[in-house]
Image (cartoon, rainbow, N blue to C red):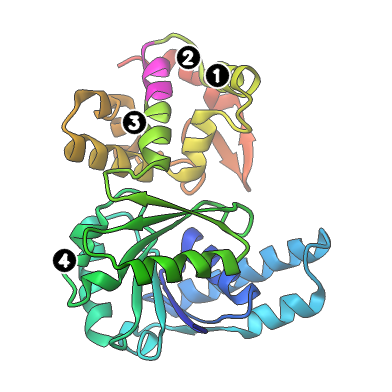
Amino acid sequence: MKNITVIGAGTMGNGIAHVFAQFGYKVTLVDLTQDSLDKALEKIAKNLERQVAKEKISEEDKTNALANISTNTDLATGVSSAELVVEAATENIDLKLKIFKDIDANAPVGCILATNTSSISITKIAAVTSRPDKVIGMHFMNPVPVMKLVEIIRGYDTSDEVTGTIMEVSKSLSKVPVEVNDYPGFVANRILMPMINEAIITLNEGVAGVEEIDTVMKLGMAHPMGPLQLADFIGLDVCLAIMNVLYEGLGNDKYAPCPLLVNMVTAGKLGVKSGEGFYSWTHGTKDLVVANNFKNKALV
């Protein structure tokens, strides 16, 4: 397997394309606009340069990786010769189902269709294709070039052969694949998102401020990043979407998203991507002014 297509040039998509290209795969990166693709290539180049500076890769490795990536704004053309397609679009079920119908209609018969979804049912996605045995979850962690884990999620019909192939492909990227079953949130987000949601509830109830909550979890639980700062990095809209999947899929009130999270997303406070969430962000740098203000504005 050498020809990979990645659908979506956002944070996850460009990271996935970066890693496949770095390890010698020919990658076609697909998005709706050339502007999005150009920005993704610029981001990949910067991240590769960072690896060069840290002596993780050579200058030649960087050049070869960039040469392995081509772009396309037409999905049908972009998947026409793929052996593996990895979808990394927005975490929206309707959008993903449409994309998978289109991929299925245009990709070669033997092509494996993977989704980077962090919570949506692989079985539901597979059901809209003519090849449910070849549909699988391949959930990379952010930032993709750095994080070792890949959750490999089997749908109801995913074959043993396809699962084995994707496990080996993940290992070829110097990742550690872990096979899990198809339940809402899988393992990573079924555990992580309720923790983040509980941190938001704790803030909303006035137990402590943003910085205090994050400090307790970093120093007391040895987390490298506090849950509210992590939520800002993930994107509060993504956190809300995953909590809704858990709430609807598991039917338990303990998964209900905190009203403060809902209100912040409604107000467009999405974290790093919008410049403001639980923290204010300037050029990726955290500003604690917003954290301190939350002591007075969190209660609803």
Residue carrying label 1 = 292
Q: How far apart are marks 2 and 3 (CA)?
A: 15 Å
Query: Would you place residue 172 above or below residue 146 in this image?
Result: below
Between discs 4 and 3, the one toward the N terminus: 4
Q: Mark 4 points at which residue?
A: 127
Q: Which of marks 1 and 4 is nearer the N terminus?
A: 4
Marks 4 and 2, how far apart at CA: 46 Å
The residue range painted magenta reads 198-205
Q: Which amino acid does label 3 sit on?
A: Leu
Q: Which residue is drawn at 53% across and 18% down?
A: 213
Q: Give the number of the disc on residue 261.
A: 3
**Residue sitting at x 35%, y 90%:** 80
In the image, is residue 290 above or below residue 176? above
Disc 2 crowd rating (10 Å Cα; few below 14, some 14-19, many 20+) is some
Depth-wise, is mark 4 or mark 3 nearer the camera?
Answer: 4
Residue at the spot 79% in from the left edge and 80% down from the top edge: 60
Residue 88 shown in magenta: no
| Residue 289 place in picture, x, y as percent | 58, 25
> Mark 2 sits on what residue?
295
Residue type highlighted by circle 2 = Lys
The answer to whether the residues at label 2 and label 3 have Cβ atoms under 8 Å apart is: no
Position of 87 relative to 242 (above/below): below
Quadrant of residue 78 in the image? Answer: bottom left
Q: Where is residue 9 in the image (x, y as percent from the top left)?
A: 46, 69
**Residue 122 in the image, given as x and y percentages of width and height:** 26, 58
Q: Can residue 275 be seen here?
A: no
Q: What residue type is labelled 4?
A: Ala
Q: Which of 174 and 139 is in front in this view?
A: 174
Residue 244 in view in this figure: yes
Q: Is label 2 or label 3 in front?
A: 3
**How dense is the environment of label 4, judged by Cα within 10 Å: few (below 14), some, or many (20 and up)?**
some
